[in-house]
């Protein structure tokens, strides 16, 4: 019985260890985007954007990190999309670099509120050879989200 308890405790420690998953929350602030595009024949905007910004990340252990990011996006045709917009971002910090790929939906008619889900792809430093998932909700360039890195 004792060996079963020790085995279960060991397995629990492995599952809950930071090596298995690193969860975080973040606050993001973007600079004004550069937009290109037009309004399509159906009255729906067809656009692409480019922007930069910063994030303040809080890890599950309380550690805080700062990042800068660059993103590009394009709207999707309304008759062929689960998301209104797709985006890809590159992020840099002292801890390493990674990319994120997003699917986003506008939450209001004015397209000032947005909700997104995405994937994380580690490149260097602490993110190398890791992947994960991420969410974001924001309005007018300010927002927050949650994420998780997996080994």
Image (cartoon, helix red, strand yellow):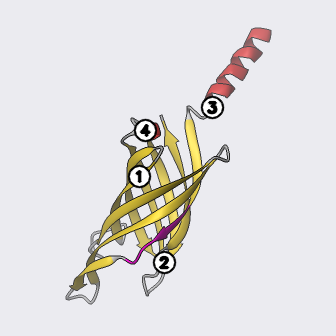
* Mark 3–mark 1 distance (CA, rounded to whole Å): 25 Å
Location of residue 93 with respect to 137 vertically, above or below: above
The residue positioned farthest toward the right in the image shown: 2
Where residue 22 sits, quadrant-wise, is top right
Q: Which of marks 3 and 1 is nearer the N terminus?
A: 3
* Mark 4–mark 3 distance (CA, rounded to whole Å): 19 Å
**Residue 17's disc number:** 3
**Residue 125's disc number:** 4
Q: Which residue is drawn at 52% across and 73% down?
A: 142
Q: Tag 2: Cα neighbours inside 10 Å, few (<14), some, or many (≥20)?
A: some
Question: What segment is highlighted magenta in the picture?
Answer: 27-32
Where residue 89 sits, quadrant-wise, is bottom left
Of circles 3 and 1, the one toward us is 1
Residue 31 lies in magenta, yes or no? yes
**Residue 92's disc number:** 1
Of circles 2 and 3, the one toward us is 3
Q: Quadrant of the N terminus?
A: top right
Q: In this view, does 123 lie to the left or right of 37?
A: right
* Mark 2–mark 3 distance (CA, rounded to whole Å): 36 Å
Q: Tag 3: Cα neighbours inside 10 Å, few (<14), some, or many (≥20)?
A: few
Q: Earlier in the sequence, mark 4 or mark 1?
A: 1
Q: Is mark 3 on a helix, strand or loop?
A: loop
Q: Where is residue 23 in the image (x, y as percent from the top left)?
A: 58, 46
Work out whether residue 40 or residue 64 is closer to the camera in this orientation and state it. Answer: 64
Q: Are marks 3 and 1 in contact (CB under 8 Å)?
A: no
């Amino acid at each position: 019985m004792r060996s079963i308890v020790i085995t279960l405790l060991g397995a629990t420690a492995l599952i809950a260890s930071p090596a298995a998953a690193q969860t975080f929350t973040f606050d993001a602030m973007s600079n004004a985007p550069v937009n290109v595009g037009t309004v399509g024949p159906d009255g729906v905007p067809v656009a692409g954007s480019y922007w930069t910004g910063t994030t303040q990340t809080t890890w599950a252990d309380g550690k805080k990190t700062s990042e800068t990011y660059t993103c590009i996006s394009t709207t999707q045709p309304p008759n062929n999309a689960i998301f209104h917009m797709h985006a890809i971002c590159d992020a840099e910090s002292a801890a390493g670099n990674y990319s994120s790929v997003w699917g986003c939906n506008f939450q209001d008619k004015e397209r000032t509120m947005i909700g997104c889900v995405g994937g994380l792809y580690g490149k260097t430093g602490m993110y190398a050879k890791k992947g994960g998932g991420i969410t974001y909700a924001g309005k007018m360039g300010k927002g927050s989200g949650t994420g998780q890195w997996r080994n």
